[in-house]
């Protein structure tokens, strides 16, 4: 399974339109079984991840007016742990830079539900029920790093190799802002503006994402 770029911006936050379906997504039995196994594995390793409802991407379009329109549907949260494109579970990822062009990176703690022990850019998470993906960008940035951006745009909509769909935002922090990592991170770093200068722990998917965002910024 390969990742894919579904739609390419940039868009301003107001140019992303969100519509929610009322009916809850009903997955196939094989997906239910896989989700049960995944959430059970989380509990065994002590993760406090809940298993409520979150958003799946039911559809999207780029309108003639230059807007990105996304249609969301309530779905079981644990489906985002299943490596399958069928559920099309949606998360928002807010990549962060400072005024000098550096990239904010954090190593995910070992207990978290996704990407445990790996380095990630910025802040991200599931789109909560009734929330818009742009709302999620702002919320995750506050929750994970306790900062407010000076500028924020929506760069792309894409699917990663696990099947998860990401709405990717790019935030610039005001001069002097000092991010404070939450408990989901056990280390933080500012990576250089040039991706070629990044440390070895920056894996290829992170480098590819940063190169794409650099083109759109």
Image: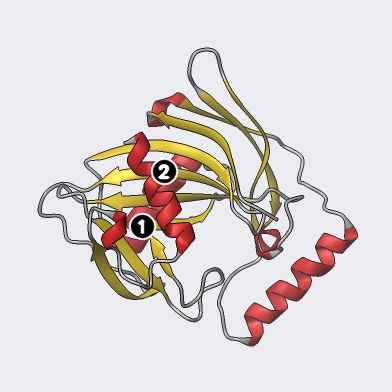
**Vertical relation: 16 (above or below) 179:** above
Q: Which mark is residue 122?
A: 1
Residue 33 x, y percent position in the rendering: 84, 68
Q: How is the image coloured?
A: secondary structure
Quadrant in the picture for residue 70: top right
Q: Nearer the viewer, residue 172 or 102?
A: 102
Q: Quadrant of the N terminus?
A: bottom right
Residue 139 x, y percent position in the rendering: 39, 51
The residue that label 2 is drawn on is: 212
Q: Nearer the viewer, residue 23 or 109?
A: 109
Residue reaching furthest top?
Answer: 64
**Vertical relation: 174 (above or below) 183:** above
Residue 209 x, y percent position in the rendering: 44, 50
- Residue at 65% from the left image edge and 51% from the top image edge: 89
Q: Are marks 2 and 1 in contact (CB under 8 Å)?
A: no
Residue reaching furthest right?
Answer: 29
Q: Quadrant of the C terminus?
A: top left
- Residue at 26% from the left image edge and 69% from the top image edge: 189
Q: Nearer the viewer, residue 85 or 113?
A: 85
Is 71 situated left or right of 198 in this image? right
The Cα–Cα distance between marks 2 and 1, rounded to whole angstroms, is 15 Å
């Amino acid at each position: 399974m390969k990742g894919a770029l579904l739609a390419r911006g940039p868009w301003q936050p107001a140019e992303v339109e969100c519509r929610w379906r009322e009916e809850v997504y009903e997955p196939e039995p094989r997906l239910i079984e896989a989700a049960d196994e995944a959430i059970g594995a989380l509990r065994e390793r002590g993760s406090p991840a809940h298993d409520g409802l979150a958003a799946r991407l039911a559809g999207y379009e780029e309108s003639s007016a230059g807007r990105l329109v996304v249609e969301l549907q309530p779905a079981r949260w644990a489906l985002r742990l299943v490596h399958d494109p069928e559920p099309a579970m949606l998360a928002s990822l807010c990549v962060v830079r400072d005024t000098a062009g550096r990239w904010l990176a954090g190593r995910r703690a070992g207990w978290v539900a996704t990407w445990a022990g790996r380095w990630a850019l910025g802040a991200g998470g599931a789109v909560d029920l009734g929330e818009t993906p742009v709302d999620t960008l702002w919320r995750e940035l506050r929750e994970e790093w306790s900062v407010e951006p000076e500028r924020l745009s929506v760069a792309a909509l894409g699917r990663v190799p696990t099947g998860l769909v990401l709405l990717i935002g790019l935030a610039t922090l005001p001069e002097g802002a000092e991010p404070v990592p939450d408990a989901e991170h056990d280390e933080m770093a500012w990576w250089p503006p040039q991706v070629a200068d990044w440390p070895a722990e920056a894996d290829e998917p992170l480098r590819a994402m940063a190169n794409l965002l650099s083109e759109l910024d």
